[in-house]
Amino acid sequence: MTDLAKHNRMANAIRFLSADAVEKAKSGHPGLPMGIADVATVLFGQFLKYDPTKPDWPDRDRFVLSAGHGSMLLYSVHYLLGSEDFTIDQLKNFRQLGSLTAGHPEYGHGAGVETTTGPLGQGLANAVGMAIAERLLSEEFGTDLVDHHTYAIVGDGCLMEGISQEAISLAGHLKLKKLIVIWDDNGISIDGKVSLADSTDQIERFEASGWETISIDGHDPAAIAAALESARSSAKPTLIAAKTTIGYGAPNKGGTEKVHGSPLGAEELEAARKALGWDAAPFEVPSDILDSWRIAGLRSGQARKEWEKRLAEADSEARGEFERRMRGDLPAGLNGALEALKKKLAAEQLTSATRKASEQILGTINEVVPETIGGSADLTGSNNTKTGQTKSITPDDFSGRYIHWGIREHGMAAAMNGMALHGGVIPYSGTFLVFSDYARPAMRLSALMKQRVIHVMTHDSIGLGEDGPTHQPVEHYAALRAIPNLNFFRPADITETLECWELALKSRETPSVLALTRQNLGSVRKTYEAENLCARGAYVIDDSADDPTVTIFASGSEVGLALEAKALLGAEGIQTRVVSVPSFELFEAQSEDYKASIVGNSPVKIAVETGIRMGWDRFIGSDGIFIGMKGFGASAPYQALYEHFGITKEAVVAAAKARIHEKVEG
Ligand SMILES: Cc1ncc(C[n+]2csc(CCOP(=O)(O)OP(=O)(O)O)c2C)c(N)n1
């Protein structure tokens, strides 16, 4: 058999495993795997540094299928390479409940799926983050330990999404030369020809963003190999524009939208078998072809063993540090450093904006946790995310620890997912809380993928003042609390900010948002407590009332206000208890007894928060009093806004007294 004939049969194995699995599932996307099979055969068969027997090898090349709807490509290839997870039975159970072969690739379902893809464009930005992490770690630990490429296959859809521009321009700017993106240029999406909706010259676009570009026939294995070879030695990130036919081999539906997202149908599948000379039954791969694939799967074993030898021979301190980083364990010095700072803060009783408090705490964290990589989407001075330890990285110098993400919130959040998935670094970002909307699709995926990604989101309420309602979050607390497995923290003072930072760092499988104030807040925690009280999600912050008539629940900047209201009520003989609620999510994780004790039995329950009411009935009941926002904010100095919207201690007192009158006395 000639090399070309062998290549064709290896590619056809991908095509028919994929098309047959879609056919059996009666759902899925055969067009992409059939169209890109030649590229995948060359990439996985000759280039990708990946050992299926050790899929978590830290120095493996990363591969991202950004066009996640083509998931069967990934499952077929990994089966062929000899994956333990993606067995033939898994392929037969494509898209079925409990199988690893989910509709779109899901991180954690099986080795070889480096990230969850499906929302188009995310994978491309994840790949940028992976390439950033590789370069940072390579700079720190040397190329003996860290020297790999990041490959991504993207479709027309990925390149149409706005996030792609953020990812592409950032990668070009940072000269991420070990990032290689292959564009499945088939000119077809769901509605039909891409030309219905887009006429971008992608080559010019990538070149304008600082990329190398190579255009090839995506069905010519020699051209694919030459392009990959050339891309690997480029000084810039490379786009390989591979012209392909969607559903290659399907004689009637190939080249059209009909093969994008529906099974071929028995007749067309049979016709494709004839056209490509494939006579194996569904889910069968001729043994010589399976052997060729399995041999390809063994290709990187030697490189992996050599890498392990280099690691074993490395300086013991560097090795220990590298291994700790890749395990994701925090350094031993963190607890002591935070404890000492917490004691100091309790003694000082500082008045501070929590964004400023965060900067001070980060100064301690960054000193003892070398893997934190900070950044901001062009709001560094406002987010207070840069500390003395975090020198900025530049396109030519990755020895720093701070990323100027530019005004690219969505790309930033998605690239941070890629960094966390790569391992060895803990990314934290900065932007205004209101712009969480711009980052939210990627934040949702951090939560779904259980990644430790930390977002510092400042200017967390009308308390930001004069910038006005476009910049004042009101529904964002509820919107972020609604994302499963995402911890939304709203600390009330500097001590709570420290505790929330500690929780965010220690939440290995949960992303966090720290919502921080622009305006100064007094200390509400008066004494040192060894226990991290914020870990409970909600706790009684001022327990002087034995049998409170009123309980006030508040978060963030409103905790201080609640304490002032308590003092006024106390002066009138009304027993009041104040509960600080830094995190709804952590509260829900407590025992039923604890939760019941916090909710309590006060006849009057009030919640105060500069957001919408949604979610607070959990604490105050549907008949509770909510003092907060009902609509958008306004532009004015913040004190005037609190007055204008009636979020004041006097309003709390008046509401409490009116309700007491009604309920207790009336
Ligand atoms: C953010 C987002 N919007 C919409 C979709 C739905 N969708 C899935 S595939 C697709 C078309 C993609 O076209 P292309 O990338 O050319 O893939 P191909 O047709 O080549 O398989 C769309 C709109 C999605 N997955 N993600």
Image: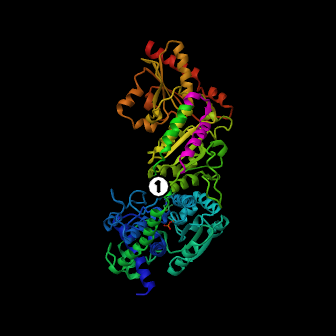
Of the pair 523 and 107, the residue shown nearer to us: 523
Element carrying mark 1: helix
Look at the image and tell me whether residue 375 can be seen: yes
Q: Which residue is mark 1?
A: 320
Q: Quadrant of residue 20?
A: bottom left
The vertical placement of 647 against 44, above or below, is above
**Span highlighted in magenta in the image:** 345-371
| Number of marks in the rendered image | 1
Of the pair 596 and 648, the residue shown nearer to us: 596
Q: Amino acid at mark 1?
A: Gly
**201 on left or right of 63:** right
In terms of secondary structure, what is the magenta stretch mainly? helix
Crowd rating for badge 1 (residues with CA inside 10 Å; few <14, some 14–19, many 20+): few
- Residue 538 in the image: state x and y as whole percent: 45, 32
Of the pair 69 and 553, the residue shown nearer to us: 553
The vertical placement of 11 against 311, above or below, is below
The vertical placement of 328 against 335, above or below, is below
> At x 34% / y 76%, what residue is drawn?
285
Q: Quadrant of residue 207?
A: bottom right
